[in-house]
């Protein structure tokens, strides 16, 4: 099964690279343009999709102006079943979006593999209303196999400015075995991480080629990095409070 999983991931990765390359480049160009104009990149996902918003946040070798929109009841640590139930609630997004500042130069990624639940769709629609460029990471196959739970009848893929297909199968379970009743082994997190990091890699190159110094974190485990990173944090901490939240409470 290990080889089958590796083979499955390789197959999907090839599909993403072949079929989505033009849109990945478009996404990178939007990220570079937004950052050059003073915007930031914001990311939202529920359940396991939220993991990808943390994957690229405060990351050595990663972009500095990254802001995950973290809503704890929609994550997993306050109750996994409850988080799934909450994601299905219409208008729930209104309760936390009013606290989020989304500006026209921002790029907002909304991640939902099934793409059918109201909360991610509402976040995407809200961000578009605020003038941000909204990118969805989802599975078209999965979405089209299931009816939307959103009151509009829309899925995430038709609620964003640009949609990136992670090519996860229906149910996000890539493998089967005759002795197991249901499919197993998800691929959406692996693909999502590759999609995001490839976009940001290209965005960094584009900024550099345009004469704009890309704001990239240096690993905190490299000597001399503290001062370098501190300047970058100061530049973005007002828009991304998570960078310095509770830093004054640290004690030895």
Image (cartoon, rainbow, N blue to C red):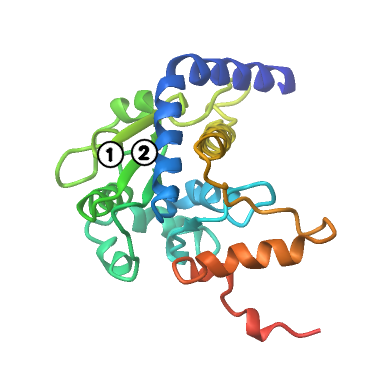
Q: In this view, does 123 lie above or below 196?
A: below
Checking the image for residue 6, the label placed there is none
Where residue 85 appears, as percent x and y from the top left, is: 36, 55
In this rendered view, identify the residue nearer to me: 158 or 56: 56
The local secondary structure at tag 2 comes to strand
- Reply above or below: 121 against 182: below
Tag 1's secondary structure?
Answer: loop
Location of the C terminus (image quadrant): bottom right
Q: Name the residue under label 1.
A: 160
How far apart marks 2 and 1 lie (CA) works out to 6 Å
Residue 126: quarter of image = bottom left
On the question of residue 177 being in view, the answer is no
The image shows residue 72 at horizontal and vertical percentages of: 47, 65
User: Percent from the top left, x then y, of residue 95?
Assistant: 28, 69
- Label 2: few (<14), some or many (≥20) within 10 Å? many
Front residue of 108/93: it is 108
Vertical placement of residue 228 versus 178, above or below: below
Find disc 2 in the rendering and name its residue: 136
Within the image, what quadrant is residue 225 found in? Answer: bottom right
Query: The N terminus appears in which quarter of the rendering?
Result: top right
Pick whichever, 27 or 207, lies toward us: 207
> Residue at 60% of width from left, 30% of height from top?
185
Q: Residues within 10 Å of mark 1 (few under 14, many from 20)?
A: many
């Amino acid at each position: 099964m290990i080889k089958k999983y590796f083979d499955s991931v390789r197959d999907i990765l090839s599909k993403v690279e072949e079929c989505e390359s033009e849109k990945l480049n478009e996404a990178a160009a939007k990220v570079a343009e937004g950052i050059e104009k003073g915007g930031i990149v914001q990311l939202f996902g529920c359940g396991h999709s939220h993991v990808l918003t943390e994957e690229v946040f405060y990351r050595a070798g990663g972009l500095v102006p990254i802001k995950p929109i973290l809503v704890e009841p929609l994550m997993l640590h306050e109750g996994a079943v409850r988080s799934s139930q909450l994601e299905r609630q219409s208008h729930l997004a209104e309760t936390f979006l009013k606290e989020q500042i989304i500006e026209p130069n921002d790029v907002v990624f909304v991640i939902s593999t099934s793409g059918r639940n109201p909360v991610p769709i509402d976040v995407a629609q809200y961000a578009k209303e605020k003038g941000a460029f909204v990118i969805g990471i989802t599975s078209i196959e999965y979405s089209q196999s299931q009816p939307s739970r959103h009151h509009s009848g829309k899925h995430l893929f038709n609620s964003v400015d640009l949609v990136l297909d992670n090519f996860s199968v229906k149910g996000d379970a890539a493998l089967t075995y005759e002795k197991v009743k249901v499919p197993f082994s998800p691929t959406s997190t692996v693909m999502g991480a590759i999609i995001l990091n490839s976009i940001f890699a290209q965005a960094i190159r584009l900024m550099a080629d345009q004469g704009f110094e890309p704001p990239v974190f240096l690993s905190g485990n490299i000597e001399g990095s503290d001062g370098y990173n501190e300047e970058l944090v100061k530049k973005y901490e007002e828009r991304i409070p998570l960078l310095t939240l509770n830093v004054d409470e640290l004690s030895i």
